[in-house]
Image: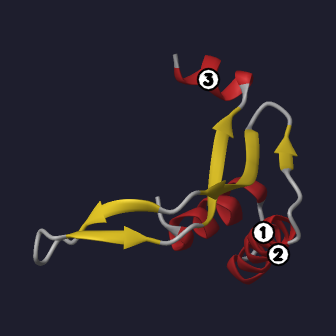
Amino acid sequence: MDKEQLIAEVAKSGGFSKKNAEKAVTVVLDSILEALKEGKEVQLVGFGKFEVRDREARMGRSRRTGKEIQLPAGKVPVFTAGLTMKEALN
């Protein structure tokens, strides 16, 4: 499911116009992103938790040449599924 499909599903399930559903989905996603940028966790009970973790510098391999290259340290987003989601999928 991509963003457009999610917006259509929110509009259909929630009885919203497509324009209002798009605004709601965009606000939610932007709010999660801003919280992560500030170093905060976003926990949606039953759904899951979004957080940012530090990744150390490491050696990698260039896809084009096959040579080893140094990959810089950085921050990566992580999602951990909540118990309700895990149970629903199993």
Q: CA distance from mark 1 to mark 3?
A: 29 Å
Q: CA distance from mark 2 to mark 1?
A: 15 Å
Q: Secondary structure at mark 3?
A: helix
- Circle 3 residues within 10 Å: few <14, some 14–19, many ≥20: few
Q: Secondary structure at mark 2?
A: helix
Q: CA distance from mark 2 to mark 3?
A: 26 Å
User: Which of the two marks, 1 or 3, is nearer to us in this view?
Assistant: 3
Q: Nearer the viewer, residue 6 or 65?
A: 65
Residue 70, x across and y down, in percent: 37, 70
Kind of residue at badge 3: Lys
Q: Secondary structure at mark 1?
A: loop
The residue that mark 1 highlights is 16
Taking the spot 51% from the left edge, 66% from the top edge, the residue there is: 5
The residue that mark 2 highlights is 27
Kind of residue at badge 1: Phe
Residue 67, x across and y down, in percent: 15, 70
